Image (spheres, rainbow, N blue to C red):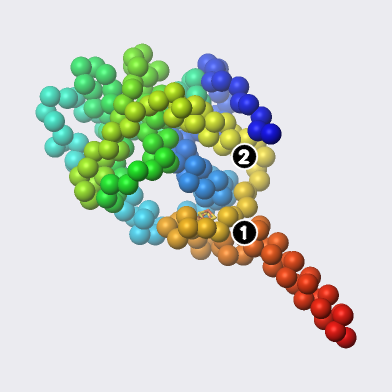
Amino acid sequence: MEVEKSPPSLREWDELDLVPLSALQHYSYCPRQYGLIYLEQVWDENIYTMKGRWAHERADEEADKLREDVQILTALPVGSDLYGLVGKCDVVELHNGIPYPVEYKHGRLKSSIHDELQLCGQALCLEEMFGVPVVRGVVYHISSKHRREVEFTPELRRQVWEVAEEIRELNASGVLPQAVYDARCTDCSLQESCMPEVTDGHLSQDWADWSEAKRALAVDGS
Ligand code: SF4
């Protein structure tokens, strides 16, 4: 049975318990990916990470082209004492003083809960910093120039908190999660370091069972 997590509360966070906004994205995509990056300091560049970096570098340039009737803040450092988050917003549009975070992603339009969690994390930080509710933001897909609006529902906010708490638990344990070799691995920049074909616990168990069965057959047949 899953233990219910305590709700967010204002506190003095230990620096080690502050969760980077990008970690919400990495952890929700794959806890092992998070562990490799943040616990083992592994970072492998591939076409996806290069595109991602390029997307963030483009953010300032693209922001200038956004509507002229909104104030634009770029590369804004943010944090939340309530949720224990820290990071940077690519672009924040100010609509009559109300912040509206915009997260730049490479590629075409694609709905992704991982991006939404990161964006919602930004919104939670902005709410505290500006003292106003932030109810919507945008994931901007550079290739298609599509702005996908995301609503920061109570459910999404709860998920941000739960993922942040799971990350803190993982940090405290210091144990790198086991790989799960599935479709996510195809696009993962850490595939070479992770080696999910051999580090997946289920596959390893299957391999162990198979080896055991083979040994038993060999003994019986002798
Ligand atoms: S290769 Fe697969 S299991 Fe390993 S970190 Fe990437 S997504 Fe996770």
Any part of residue 212 in sight: yes
User: Residue at the bottom extreme?
Assistant: 222
Which residue is labeled 1 in the image? 200
Quadrant of residue 94 within the rendered picture: top left
| Amino acid found under the numbered disc labelled 2 | Leu
Label 2 near ligand 1 (CB < 8 Å): no
Label 1 near ligand 1 (CB < 8 Å): yes
Question: What residue sits 77% from the left and 76% below the top?
Answer: 214
Q: Is residue 181 left or right of residue 50?
A: right
Question: What residue sits 62% from the left and 60% below the top?
Answer: 199
Q: Is residue 76 left or right of residue 67?
A: right
Which residue is labeled 2 in the image? 170
Q: Which mark is residue 55?
A: none
* Quadrant location of the C terminus in the rendered image: bottom right
Q: Position of residue 207 (x, y in %)?
A: 69, 68
- How far is mark 1 from mark 2, CA to CA? 18 Å
- For disc 1, the neighbor class at 10 Å (few under 14, some 14 to 19, many from 20) is some
Residue 24 drawn above or below residue 83: below
Quadrant of residue 17 within the rendered picture: top right
207 and 102: which is toward the camera = 207
| Amino acid found under the numbered disc labelled 1 | Asp
Q: Position of residue 162 (x, y in %)?
A: 54, 31
